[in-house]
Amino acid sequence: MLTAYRQSEAQRQEMGIPPKPLTDAQVTALCELLADPPAGQEQELLDLLTHRVPPGVDPAAKVKAEFLAAIAKGEATCPLIAPKEAVALLGTMGGGYNTGALFDLLAHPELGTPAADALARLVIVPDVFDKVVEAAKNLPAAEKVLSAWADGLWFTEKKALPDALTVTVFKVDGECNTDDFSPAGEAWSRPDIPLHALSMLTSRDENALATIEELKAKGHPVAFVGDVVGTGSSRKSATNSLLWHIGDEIPFVPNKRAGGVVLGGKIAPIFFNTLEDAGALPVECDVTALSTGQVVTIRPYEGTVTDEAGTVLSRFALKTEVLFDEVQAGGRIPLIIGRNLTAMARKAKGLEESDLFRATPVAADTGKGFTLAQKIVGRACGMDGVRPGTYCEPKMTTVGSQDTTGPMTRDELTELACLSFASDLVMQSFCHTAAYPRPVDIAMHDTLPGFMTSRGGVALKPGDGVIHSFLNRMILPDTVGTGGDSHTRFPMGISFPAGSGLVAFAAAMGRMPLDMPESVLVRFTGTPKPGITLRDIVNAIPLAAIEKGLLTVAKEGKKNIFSGRILEIEGLSHLSVDEAFELTDASAERSAAAATIRLSEAQVSRYLKSNVALLKSMVAQGYEAKETLTARIKAMEAWLNAPSLLTADTDAEYAEVIEIDLATLTEPILACPNDPDDVKRLSEVTGTPIDEVFIGSCMTHIGHFRAAAALLEGDGEVPVRLWMTPPTVMDKDQLRREGLYNPLCRAGARMEIPGCSLCMGNQARVAPNTTVLSTSTRNFPNRIGDGANVFLGSAELAAVTARLGKLPDPATYFTEMEALAGRENEIYRFIDLSEDKE
C-alpha cells in the first residue's frame, strides 16, 4: 500500500497537486502498519492518518475512527498514538463515526475530560445529542459538553472577519461563467478538486494560473475580481476550483479549501450562495477601477475598497450582515448547523435564546397580498407567505442530483455525516455521462446508486434520460425543492437550484436556507400566430426586457432585472406541465433564483395521473428505494383525491411587471452567439450558414421530435450534421412505437441515447469553429465545441434550418411550418402513461 501510495504521490507532485485522500482499504493497511511501524517511517504513517483521511461518514473515516476508538478504550495499542492522543485525533474528524466513541469516553476516568473537550467543538452530532442531554444530568463531562454547545464554543473560538483585508487583485474582464472555472470537458475530474482546478480558466487565458501564483508572491491573499461572475451550472465545482487557488487549507480535511474573497460587478445568485456555503466572502460592487496586480484593502464593515494610497475605489453594502458570521463559522452551512445546535442545547438547559449570532433578516409586513412563489415557500415554512428579504428554511420535499455533480454531493453528504435522507424524495440521475462514459464514469455508475439508495434515495439508470425531465415527474404541486443543476426549475411548485454542498444539506436535513427573493411578473396576453413556438415565447422574455431597458447584453455595468429574483409567469395556464417546463427551465438563463408558472388544475391532474403510473412501473421494475417511490405515489394520489392549487393574490407586489402580447410575436426569436441574453428576431440573422444542428436537452419534449420528423420527412439526408437526443427513455420508446426513428434517421439524424448529449459538452461535442443551431439551454463560449458559434432556438426552426443548411428568412420558415397545420394536437400531445398500452 505504502509503495503504491508513494508512486501516486510522486506522479501528482509532478502536476503540482497533492495525492488523493486515502481509501478505506488504504486506511486499513495503514492501521496495520501503525500497530507495528517500520523504523524510519513513523512520522510519515502518523501524518497520513492525521491529515489524509476524509472526515464524516466516508468509509475510510469509519476505519480510522474504529482504530482510534480501540486505542482510546484500551482494546488495541499503537506505539505512536497514546490513548489521549487517539481521543484528540477523534476530535479532528468532523462528525460521524467518531462521535459515538467520544460520547462513550465521557465516562472514562482519565479520558473523560479530553473526550469532552473534543466533543464540545463538534457541531455535527445528531447521533449523540440526545445522549449528551440525558447524561449531563449526572455526568460532569457530559454537562461540560452541553454547556459548551450552549455557549457556542465552536463559534467563539474561531477568528472573526478582520476590519481590513489587504489583497492582490486578479481580474477577469467581462463575464466569467462557471464553464470558465470548471470546464465541461473536464467534468469527469470534478470530485478530485486539485486535479480539476488545473483546468480553471484555461479556455480564457493559458497563463491565468501562473499569474495567480505570481501574484501570491506579493505576500497578500489573491482576490478574484470580475465584471460578471459565476453564471452557469457548475457552481460547486467552480467554487472548489476557484478556492483551491485563492482559499485556505481546511485543517484535517484533505484536498479541499475554504475562505477567499470574490468581488464582482454582478455575482450570479447560485454562485454567490455556493461561495457563502464554502466560507468565502462574496461582495458585489463596482469593479471598474480594479485591475490585475493592484494591492487593495477591503474594509467589510465600512463597505469600502481602497488602493495603497487610501483612495476609495469602490463602495459596497454586503447582502446581509450574517455574512460576517458565515465567514467566521467557516461557511453558511456550518453556521446553520452550529446555530441550531446552540439553540437546542440552550433549550435543553432551560436557557434563553443566544444573542451570540447576528439576527437573520425579517422583512416588514407590507399588508399586501402574496405572489404565488411567496405562498408556496410560505406553505413549506408553515406560514401564509414569506415576504422578500426574509430569511427562512423551507421544507425540501424533492431534491435532485445529477452525475457530474453527484460525486461532489456524495462527498458533501459524508462530511455532513448523513446516513439517511430527511427530504421526502432524493433522486440521482446519470444523464450527463451515459452516452460516452469514461472508466471513471463507469465506476461512478457502479457505486453512486448504492450510496444514494442506502440512504433512501431513488437512483435512475444510465440511459433513463435527463434529470429534469424525470424529476419533474416526481414532484408535488405547491411544494419546494432543489437540485444540483441550475436547470432544476420545477413547472409545478418551485425549486431553488443550488451547489452540491447546499443540495447535500437539503437532502440530509430536509430543509434549505433561503433569503426570500423579490419577484418579477411576466404576464402574457393574446394569441400567437401559427408557427410561433414556445421557444419563441421563452426568448420573448429577455427581448421584452431589453426593449424596456431592464436587461443589457454588455457585461460591463450589466443590467438584469431577473438576476437573483423569482420569475413568475401568468397567462399561459392552458399549457401542459411538460410545455410549462420549457418556460421555467429557461429562467436559469435569466440568472433568476427560481421560477413559477400558473397552471390549470386539469393539466396538473392529468400530469400527476401519468406520473403515478410511471412511479408504479418503476417500483415493478425494481427501482430503489421502493419505500420512497411508494410514499411519493401515495402523496400524488392524495393530491388527486382533493386537487387544489395556490394562486397569487391580486394585490401581490412585484419588483417589476413585464407585459407581453403574444400577438406581437410575428417571427421566431433566437439567442445569438454566444450569449443567451443576446436575443434577436430571425430576420436579423437570416441566411447565416449553419454547420451542425442539435435537437435535444431538457428544453425539449416528445412533441418537438414529432414536429421535426414531419418537417424533415421526404427530402433525404440534410446538408448539416444533425444530432437528436430524446430527453427520456419514455420519449425514445414512444418515438420508436410511432415509427418516427425511420424518417429521422433517413434525414441523417445521429440519434443519441436519452440524456444530455451535446447540451453540456462534457462528452459529445460539435466540430471546432462551427456555427450551430441548438435547442439546448445555453450557448456560452466553447461550451459545446471549441470556438463554436451557437444560436439557440426552437426544435421547429432547427428542423427547417437543417433542411436548408442556413437560417431561413421568416417567410420561408412560416411556409415550411404549414406542414404542421391542423396536426398540432396530434403532434404536441404529451405522453400519458396512465393510458393502457400494449
Image (cartoon, rainbow, N blue to C red):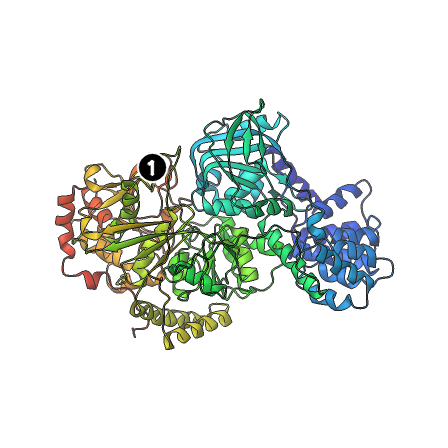
Q: Which of these two is toward me, 557 or 472?
A: 557
Q: Secondary structure at mark 1?
A: loop
Q: Position of residue 208 (x, y in %)?
A: 51, 29
Q: Position of residue 423 (x, y in %)?
A: 52, 64
Asked whether, in this view, residue 648 is left or right of residue 265, the answer is left
Q: Is residue 424 above or below residue 793?
A: below
Q: Which of these two is toward me, 145 or 308?
A: 308
Q: Position of residue 489 (x, y in %)?
A: 40, 55
In this view, which residue lies farthest toward the right?
109
In this view, which residue lies farthest toward the front?
367
10 Å crowding of disc 1: few (<14), some (14-19), many (20+): some
Q: Which of these two is toward me, 248 or 719?
A: 248
Q: Position of residue 10 (x, y in %)?
A: 65, 36
Q: Is residue 170 above or below residue 235?
A: above
Q: What residue is shown with label 1?
A: 553
Q: Which of these two is toward me, 676 or 836?
A: 676
Q: Residue at x 57, y 33 (%)?
A: 298
Q: Is residue 633 above or below residue 326?
A: below
For the C terminus, the image quarter is bottom left
Q: Is residue 117 visible?
A: yes
In this view, which residue lies farthest toward the bottom?
641
Q: Is residue 266 above or below residue 341?
A: above
Q: Residue at x 56, y 56 (%)?
A: 505
Q: Is residue 743 visible?
A: no
* Count of marks placed on residues: 1
Residue 302 lies in quadrant: top right
Asked whether, in this view, residue 704 is left or right of residue 413, the answer is left
Residue 349 lies in quadrant: bottom right
Residue type highlighted by circle 1? Val
Asked whether, in this view, residue 568 is left or right of residue 382, the answer is left
